[in-house]
Amino acid sequence: MSRGSTEVGDPVNASPGEATRQVPRVPAGPWPSLWHNRNFVQFWSGETLSLYGTQITILALPLTAVLVFHAGARELGLLRFLELLPYPAFSLLFGVWVDRSRRRPLMLGANVARMILLALVPILAAMGKLHLVSLMVIAFAVGAASVLFDVSWMSYIPTLIQDRRYLVEANTKLGISGSSADVAGPGLAGLVVSVVTAPVALALDSVSYLVSLLSLLFIRVPEPRPPAPAEQRRVGRELIEGLRWVFGHRYLRAVAFMGFFCNFFLMFVSSMFLLYAVRDRALSPPTLGLILSTGAVGGLLGSLIAGSILRRGRLGRTYVLSMGAVFLGPALIPAAGGSKPVMEAMFMASFFISYSGLSVANVVIVSLRQAVTSPSFMGRMSAGMRMMLFGGGALGSLTGGVLGDAIGLRGALAAAAIGSAAMVVPVTLSPVARLAALPVPVDTEPEPEQAAAADVFTV
């Protein structure tokens, strides 16, 4: 998620590479909802089912390691690290690829890869050839395909909807899908795992990628091929251009660093909580799924109200409050005690608070990123952000495993809660906190002198 003291909207005080103007909160004249956009609805429907399937993998993959191979804190942390490692490892390279190519074929290829890889888990288990090492290899490969898909679809959305006035609505609808999957998915996953075992449950996610693949095949929006460069382009230079675009823009730089720490603590907590709940608190997979599902109701609520909040309130204030909820929520997990119902209620409250804030923050951040980025940098911007977000998540999972093994699971969760709460201070001081509304660049493409002022090379 990740992703000056002057008020945004004052181009005199803004740096040349970041000159902005305020978009009115109420657009001039109504326009149809995206419900009337058949291609977007088709893409959204396929993605929604895929997100539901992914929830099974989120629970079933680590449970396979814990219940089948009796993995400890260090092994589980390593598994989650390998699952997320492709994001910092490949994001920038894939971002260059995305900016050079049509996005839809890349998304199709990524879904084919994920479908096949997840189907291998129950097949290998049935043959007696599934091992912890092979599970980690598959997790890494699925993560690599997910990087390509994520960088591609975030860059594809502006092409699909063809009007940037729809960005908040599109991201809100996709956020609702993700949050509703968070609500229903873990409970369904816990039930499926308890009935058919964790390895077999992964086959259902494989089917969901097939449906997403078919939905992409029937989209009819023409996607133009990126223009041929005037001179031969070098991958290294394009990587540097993408990084300088992200870290040379004060808003993108702010959300990138904050996203790093957000994912660091969220993945630290979620990785260790799963083992803590199963080992130390003796919670069954269905109970664990129910806790995650109930807590994720907050995520769905956040997605449902995000658009309304942004239309009626200051964007910066919404960002601060939503990110504050994300960073303060984990404190309830190590504090949970008393009777089992009270303990479970505190677990639920922790996830409810964090994920309701995360859903609102995601709509703010993704819309901001898309609004201030020119089309020629969209793939590399998304890639740079994914590198930061999931680099933080991968490091958080690994750190959680090491610390959980060293000082115990509850002690590690308490340390994470303290560090996470401290992040409220930099959130409040962020330049994004002072935004009144969603900014857009004055120019769609950066001029050479603007790029130089923002420390960005032109393509």
Image: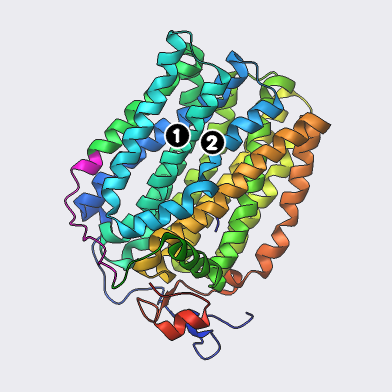
- The secondary structure that dominates the magenta segment is loop
Residue at position x 62%, y 49% in the image: 392
Provide residue 195's location: percent of width, then percent of height. Answer: 47, 12
Q: Left or right: where does residue 182 sit relative to residue 423?
A: left
Contact (Cβ within 8 Å) of mark 1 with mark 2: yes
> As shown in the figure, which amino acid type bears the numbered disc 2?
Glu
Question: Which quadrant of the rendered structure holds the N terminus?
Answer: bottom right
Residue at position x 41%, y 82% in the image: 448
Identify residue for label 1: 142
Identify residue for label 2: 83
Colour scheme of the rendered structure: rainbow
Provide residue 170's location: percent of width, then percent of height. Answer: 35, 56
Residue 308 appearing in the image: no
Residue at position x 79%, y 43% in the image: 415
Stretch of the chain drawn in magenta: 215-229
Where on the picture, by quarter, is residue 111? top left
Q: Left or right: where does residue 123 sit relative to residue 327?
A: left
Q: Give the crowd class for mark 2: few <14, some 14-19, many >=20 residues within 10 Å.
A: many
Residue 225 is a magenta residue: yes
State whether residue 296 is above or below residue 342.
below
Provide residue 180's location: percent of width, then percent of height. Answer: 44, 39
Question: Which quadrant of the rendered structure holds the C terminus?
Answer: bottom left
> As shown in the figure, which amino acid type bears the numbered disc 1?
Val
State whether residue 187 is above or below residue 449.
above
Provide residue 72's location: percent of width, then percent of height. Answer: 69, 23
| SS class, disc 1 | helix
